[in-house]
Image (cartoon, rainbow, N blue to C red):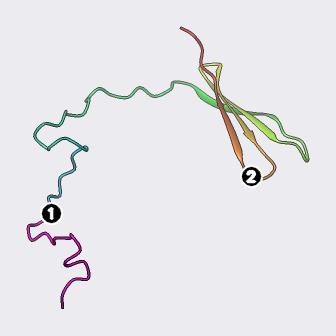
Amino acid sequence: MESYLTGRGYKESTKELDSTFSPYGQSGKDSVPADPSPISKPTDLSSEVIFDEKDCPKVEVKSLDGKPSEIIVHLDDGRILCIQCQYPE
């Protein structure tokens, strides 16, 4: 049986697919190797609920080494608002 797309500009490939992944526009030989440097993990990550009352959004603060790093607001309809805290070094 003939393919539905035959004659519509589609050509079936007869060669086997290459199973190696390469980013768009690069061949496998030209790709840059991954950075082997280890990813540092936070030393002291803590989470605290600072506001939780009936019929109000719940507010949670995640701290890293004693500094707030993220404020998470859990809204009544199930949505979550995340606010990232960034400090100048």
The structure residue drawn at horizontal position 64% and vertical position 19%, both measured from the top left corner, is 66
Q: Position of residue 85 (x, y in %)?
A: 63, 23
The structure residue drawn at horizontal position 70% and vertical position 39%, both measured from the top left corner, is 81
Q: Position of residue 53 (x, y in %)?
A: 89, 42
Label 1 sits on what residue type?
Leu
Task: Give the side of residue 46 with respect to residue 18, left or right.
Answer: right
Q: Counting residues from the N terminus, which is met first, the one under dot 2 or under dot 1?
A: 1
Distance, label 2 to label 1, CA atoms, is 44 Å
Work out whether 61 lies above or below 58: above
The structure residue drawn at horizontal position 21% and vertical position 70%, both measured from the top left corner, is 10
Q: Which residues are magenta?
A: 1-17
Q: Magenta region, mostly helix, strand or loop?
A: loop
Label of residue 78 in the image: 2
Task: Give the side of residue 27 with respect to residue 45, left or right.
Answer: left
Where, by quadrant of the figure, is residue 38 drawn? top left
Label 2 sits on what residue type?
Gly
Where, by quadrant of the figure, is residue 29 drawn? top left
Comparing 82 with 16, the one in front is: 16
Circles 2, 1 touching at the beta carbon (< 8 Å): no
Task: Give the side of residue 56 with respect to residue 8, left or right.
Answer: right
Residue bearing the label numbered 1:
17
Comparing 86 with 11, the one in front is: 11
The structure residue drawn at horizontal position 21% and vertical position 42%, both measured from the top left corner, is 25
SS category of the residue bearing label 2: loop
Comparing 88 with 11, the one in front is: 11
Work out whether 76 lies above or below 71: below
Task: Give the side of residue 75 with respect to residue 15, left or right.
Answer: right
